[in-house]
Amino acid sequence: MTAFFALATSLLWGLADFGGGVLTRRLPALTVVVVSQGIAAAVLGAVVVVTGGWSEAGPRLWFAFAAGLAGPVALICFYKALALGPMGVVSPLGTLSVAVPVGVGLFLGERPGMMQAAGIAVAVTGVVLAGGPQLRGAPVQRQAIVLTLIAALGFGTVFALIAEASTTVTGLFLALFVQRLVNVGVGGAALYVSVRRGTPALPPTGFPWHSLPALAFIGLADVAANGTYAIAAQHGPITVAAVLASLYPVVTALAARGLLNERLRTLQAAGAGLALVGTVLLATG
């Protein structure tokens, strides 16, 4: 059961990332975040009412509130990086978010074992190779690499905060609902400021209503992924759940290759692969 739900998590996250990257090529990243997270918040609100999640309200929700502040920054950076592409490089680098819990452990006095130290070295090497140097042709845009690393830091922070925000499944639903309400509030405020500064929130042709199902899928897939991951972690070793769930970049890369015909240079592919290997080593160490 753990393997099934963890692999379902990787599938959902991978497809959500792919959809977010594609839509950000048509719509501003802020618009994608606000609309998709708004739909997710509405659905989560209904789930909280049905499951009686309000009974789990308490001081721990401040962790969810903080996660809601960090989440929009991470999502916007990640979607912009995916739009710059190639997704096969950007998505694996995003899994470096697992380094955040490791950093928290170091701050609290823990020391990494041999496996974790190897994971850090391999992941850093992967970052360098994924961004270049290239023997010929243009390397991956530096902006895409920087945005991805910022997103990874934000995602890692969100994961750490959400882990502290609840101790039960119904509490997790409530925490995710609070997080997404804050996501929408912060993202909406940023979108308002962006529009006031002259940046359009929509393309010249107006809101692409044909993209609404895709926007809904992005938000709902992210919510579902959090739910399947929680189930996987509750029914088996969290290490197994984390490693299998961290395979979501493979889904994004395969979707980009199959649907967008992306082709990676050998060095880029090797760097992205090393980053993914380093992430697995960190998670299992």
Image (cartoon, rainbow, N blue to C red):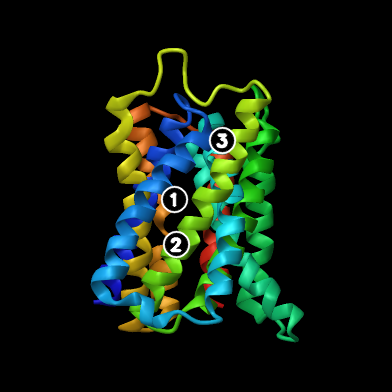
Q: What element carries label 3?
A: helix
Residue displayed at 54% across by 80% down: 60
Residue linked to disc 2:
246
The picture quadrant where one finds residue 5 is: bottom left
1 or 3: tag closer to the N-terminus: 3
Res 249 label: 1
The picture quadrant where one finds residue 98 is: bottom right
The x, y position of residue 90, in whole percent, is: 54, 42
Residue displayed at 56% across by 81% down: 59
Q: Is residue 281 above or below residue 90?
A: below
The residue lying toward the viewer, choosing from 142 and 181, is: 181
Q: In this view, does 204 lie above or below 165?
A: above
Viewer-nearest of discs 3 and 2: 3
The x, y position of residue 242, in whole percent, is: 44, 71
The x, y position of residue 19, in whole percent, is: 38, 38
Instruction: Kindly identify the amino acid type of the residue bearing the numbered disc 3.
Output: Lys
Q: How crowded is mark 2: few (under 14 residues within 10 Å), some or many (20 or more)?
A: many
Note whether residue 266 is visible.
Answer: no
Q: Is residue 169 above or below residue 94?
A: below
Res 80 label: 3
Position of the C terminus by quadrant: bottom right
Instruction: Kindly identify the amino acid type of the residue bearing the numbered disc 2.
Output: Ser
Q: Do the residues labelled 2 and 1 touch (CB within 8 Å)?
A: yes
The residue lying toward the viewer, choosing from 240 and 185, is: 185
> What distance separates the C-alpha of mark 2 from that of mark 1?
7 Å
Q: What element carries label 2?
A: loop
> What distance separates the C-alpha of mark 1 from that of mark 3?
16 Å
In the image, taking residue 197 as reference, residue 265 lies left or right, namely left
The x, y position of residue 207, in whole percent, is: 38, 23
Viewer-nearest of discs 1 and 3: 3
